[in-house]
Amino acid sequence: MKKGSKYTSKPVSVNGTVNWTKSENKIWEDLVKEQLPQVRDYACREYLEGLQYLNFPEKEIPQLPDINSILAKMTGWKVEAVPALINFDRFFELLANRRFPAATFIRRRKEFYYLQEPDIFHELFGHCPLLTNKHFADFTARYGQIGLNATHKERIKLARLYWFTVEFGLLKQGDLWKVYGGGILSSVGETAYCETNQPEHHKFNILEALRTPYRIDIMQPIYFYMNSLEELEQLSEELIMENVHKAMELGLLPAKFPPKSA
């Protein structure tokens, strides 16, 4: 949703496939090899179930039609190829219609461990397994519908809600924090870090989340956790928008990180 990107999405054929190169497939293979053991340890049950359903190939980037045939049957979702970055209008329109945007490029080797913009690994490996889950899938579609009708200022707050849930959210399962946020699940470094005592772990409070500053270029200093994905699904439009407006009135809380150096 930014104005510029260092990457360009690859063209998609009429049947929805992408001609990935050998080196691009190798990056996917290496990312999966590093991340799969971590998600097995730290991901929530629902993500791991979705990972089994989708059964991603480990040595090559999955083709979208193969994923879509499974998602469509389970929750009515599909993944749609998009340019490297899209604007708010397109983003919310896609989600509202149960279309999950995925840019058809994969990170370069020099950005293997951290990439500030979402690539195909982030979108497919990080997010798609949970789109097999009804609670997560229904919330994401409703979020898109809310954003579609929101003003630009409201959308800025809605993006903060997305950040602390869909991208960097945790669940409390038993005595452990388990990850459901795709930004964590696609990050080799952050998956284990979020479970340590270094960051703060706050029980999810929508107003606090909407007022909490964040940076995209660092490990997060704060994570919000819920008790279940049902709790996420129960965030109604009325509750969300009421708190969006409160957050707009109250402003941001003090940041838990230093300002970004010029």
Image (spheres, rainbow, N blue to C red):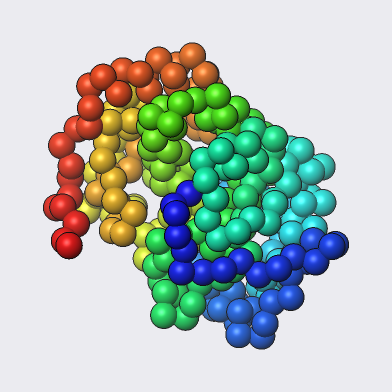
Q: Give the side of residue 120 with respect to residue 196, left or right.
A: right
The residue sitting at the bottom extreme is 22
Quadrant of the frame with the C terminus: bottom left
What x and y, as percent, mark residue 112? Answer: 44, 75
The residue sitting at the right extreme is 15
Q: Nearer the viewer, residue 153 or 19?
A: 153
What x and y, as percent, mark residue 243? Answer: 37, 19
Image point (46%, 69%), residue name: 6
Image point (22%, 32%), residue name: 252
Q: Nearer the viewer, residue 150 or 71?
A: 150
Q: Give the side of residue 217 with respect to residue 115, left or right.
A: left
Query: Compared to 251, does 116 lie above or below?
Result: below
Image point (15%, 37%), residue name: 254
Query: Compared to 253, does 117 lie above or below?
Result: below
Query: Compared to 245, does 131 lie above or below?
Result: below
Q: Give the side of residue 53 with respect to residue 37, left or right.
A: right
Image point (59%, 74%), residue name: 28
Q: Give the side of residue 148 with respect to residue 112, left or right.
A: right
What x and y, as percent, mark residue 258? Answer: 14, 52
Whether residue 211 can be seen here:
yes
Report which quarter residue 191 is drawn in.
bottom left
What x and y, as percent, mark residue 100? Answer: 64, 46
Whether residue 32 can be seen here:
no
